[in-house]
Image: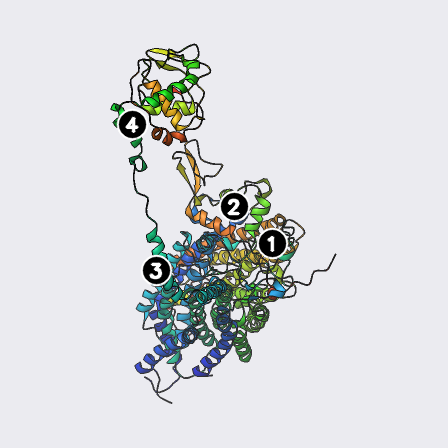
Amino acid sequence: MEPSRDTPLVRFGAFWLALGIFLIFALILALFGWFNNTPQTDLEADAAKVRYETKAKVDAAQAANLTPEAIVAAIPLIAKELAATKPVAVEKPEQLIPGAHLEAGAAASNEPIDPAVMERGKAQFLVCSACHGQQGEGGPIAPPLAGSEWVSGPIDNLVRIQLRGLKGPITVKGTEYNFPAGMTPMSYQTDQQIADVLTYVRNSFGNKGSAVKPEQVTPLRGEVGQPLTVDQLTKP
Amino acid sequence: MSLRTFILGLSASFGIAWLAVIVVPYFKMRDMAPIQLSEEADGKTGIFYPKRTGRVADGALVYAENGCYLCHTQVIRPTYAGNDLYRADWAGLKEDADRGDTRRETNAFDFTYEKFAQIGVTRLGPDLSNIGRRVESLYAPKADPAKWLYAHLYNPRYRPELRASACPSYRFLFVEQTIKGSRSVDALPFGGTETTELVPTSEAKALISYLLSLKKDQAVPAALNFSPAKKDG
Amino acid sequence: MSSDSIPTPTQDALLRSSIDRSLRHPVMFFMTSGAAWLAVSIILGIISSAKVHSPHFLDGCAWLTYGRVFPAHINALVYGWGFQAAFAVIIWLMARLSRQECRSAGIILTAGHIWNLAVSMGVIGVLSGNGTGMPWMEFPSFTWPVLLASYFMIVVWSFIQFRVRPEGHVYISQWYILAAMVWFPWIFLTANLLLNCFPGHPLMGAGINAWYKSGLIFLFFTPVGLGTAYYLAPKVSGRPIHSYSLAKLGFWSLAIIGPWAGMQKLAGVPIPYFLPYFGAAATVMMFIPAACAGANILRTAFFSKDAVAESPSLRFSIAGVISLVVMGAAALILNLPGSTLKLTQFSIAGYGFELLALYAFFSFVMFGAIYFIVPRITRREWLSRRLITMHFFFSIYGIMAVAVVALFAGLEQGSAQESWQLPWMNAAVTTRPYAWFATIAWCFILFSNLFFFLHLTLMWLRLGRRSSHPTLLISSHGSSPHGSEGDIDNTGADHAAAH
């Protein structure tokens, strides 16, 4: 009889033989995986390939027509044109600062009123006197202008009323007036005409105020819309 | 028979099957080339790429974790293997407004971006390959399809035609929260009180986004189209 | 060592009893923890089966939603009960047949505890919503290396024992057990590497998963069950195997046909066309090894009809082998590509077939083995014949209901599904009666196994009968079960229980 094969060495060998047999197909699989390591195609990337090809074609065509040398040569010309255009100088503060035109008006309040302006304004006032009275005393359809705090108040109010009209109740010299028709807008008048008539009204019928310049009317030309109401005006 | 003969015989009998049925098909399918569309047959160029929009990967995970694959399948078998293609709304739409009959069998590109194709174990519930198309076109054509699906998930037996449904209620994917300010956009139209509302959790949203992405009825290129030529008239 | 190679009967009996003593702890551990997992699995099975026909049942709890409790049930049945029963049987059979004592009981016990821990974490992972969504592989993916490592540390010793066996004839059971030991890591590693580690096409992943499921049934549980049945039938009936060449034919036909099966579940899916049909052909041909082994074992056992009637282990094993033949026939009938495959592919016939394999065949043979092995390693006899008969008959009732589900439900549900002119709800409600059947079947099985658990626990606590006479289901000649001698030591050479 051959000697028993039950020796520690055989047992040790059998352990590793078992491990090897159990793992053999996993090892073959790992080898397959290692040799088959092509990067997986992604349908998204494949679909995008066409777009990238088109882009490459367009880029090539552009590059062919617009060579780097041409670009470099064009730079001095463009630079010259840019340098030739002057930036606009800031001449008036109201180009940068909102409301600056009001200060201009306030600064000019001590200047003497130009008589030519007063003449033109007086002629223009004939339109206003139809409602406001020849002496600015008011009437059945308009409040008085004589001694009115609104007239000697902020110029903005007068310009805006002139451009948009006024409706609703308004308190003048302590009395509340509420005329159903209100004041119609006079926006057909030019800046000069508005400035003249407002200067005349502010310096007549006992009123004393600074002149209104046409430059103070122009910025408010954007005022359009329904007639104003008193709460849209600045309190005098 | 010695141990060596035994192991060799076992390895050979197993190994041949293993190679033929598992390893070679696995590695070949991994390297599948995309199908090029041809100008004459398909009318356009490029590759066949049935794009899916939605949170496909997250939603597929919720689908797998909650065992939806145990009752729902996601495969339309060709006619030699089953009658799925004949049903009016499983494989696509029989009467789509724009394209007519859009039904088609499943193809190998339909499971892109999923890790494991949830083919399904049984059909205790309907096939879900085109559930997105069905909900948008047939079940909730004028309403929000996501809301329809949220309602179904919350209580599958809510609709009278689905009273006999055996689908479990996935109430645990929704949460009741207090209304902060106005009602949330995702809030369900039912449930909750005057001060609370039912909203879906992010898992429910991912799942519904995944289900609505299941529209496997895009036109296939001529290379993949095995249906017989349509007869005129 | 003695110079003569053939020991005397007394020496052989002493060797066998020392083998039994060395193996007592690992084998009892695997049997009792396996039985505990069987209990868990049956309860989860009842809950999940109830939810198919009564979805309101326990539907407030996220952990018990059907999609989680069903995978927990099937995975607990396979990895908790099936594998541990298989481990017990593999260790004991290989040790006995190779006439080697077990020297690594400590390592095996430790590895067994680690296996149990991994299965517990897996089941909790599935129930808490962290399953992977791959049928029969739903445990979270950190568990598979742990399971594989503890598997290796449990069964490698049996391989070593085979390698160092004394010269002589190798019995068919040893080949079956060895094959099962080797096949499992091959299919487990392949499936887990390709599905969890390598990036691949999602459809092939589904195919490999189906192949894995079928591989576990045909290439692990079937050979372990057959190895056990091939041991018990001649041992208990006292007759040699009817035909050794038929046994070898059965084994090699299993080895050649088995690895091709599985992908028939993916018929019509866009994978290479031949894969599902090779799978269907292989599954259909599984009838051949089932019939060969069945014919062989049944002829051997029924040569002595009294033994089948009297011995619990033989009765259970023979019922199991008959179920194997039924399973082979079911594999044939349910997977014919031209006719029945499209009907059963997505029906509960699949579940019924899996239960035929795992419970009707495998578990019955395991019960037979447990009723045989436990008295030998605890040196006590089973306490009550009635507990055994209750276990047997209620399990038979349960499994007959499952066979109905497998064979009829699948075909009817499938034809309803294929009737495309009718609305889908029609097909969905045809399943209901069969779902009730399945729940009733599981209730019977739970009821039967309560007796088994009670009995096994008593034996585990060493409260069995001290006797030299085995507990028989029909006592012959009206003799007392304790016998005339009533002696404790049941390893005497001339007693039937000594083998």
Q: Is residue A231 visible?
A: no
Label 2: which residue? Answer: C55
Q: Nearer the viewer, mark 2 or mark 1?
A: 1
What residue is pinned by disc 1?
B92
* Relative image position of residue C386 (x, y in whole percent): 48, 56
Task: Name the quadrant containing residue C288.
Answer: bottom right
- In this rendering, is residue B8 above or below B78? below
- Could you say whether the residue bearing mark 4 is in a helix, strand or loop? helix
Dots 4, 1 in contact, CB < 8 A: no
State the CA–CA distance, disc 2 to disc 4. Answer: 85 Å
Chain under disc 4 = A
Crowd rating for badge 2 (residues with CA inside 10 Å; few <14, some 14–19, many 20+): many
| Labelled pair 2, 3 in contact (Cβ < 8 Å) | no
Q: Residue placed at 40% from the left, 18% from the top?
A: A125
User: In what quadrant of the picture does the C terminus of chain B appear?
Assistant: bottom right
Relative to residue B76, is residue B67 drawn left or right?
Answer: left
For the residues marked 4 and 1, what is the alpha-carbon distance in whole angstroms?
A: 77 Å
Residue B148 in percent (x, y) is at 53, 43
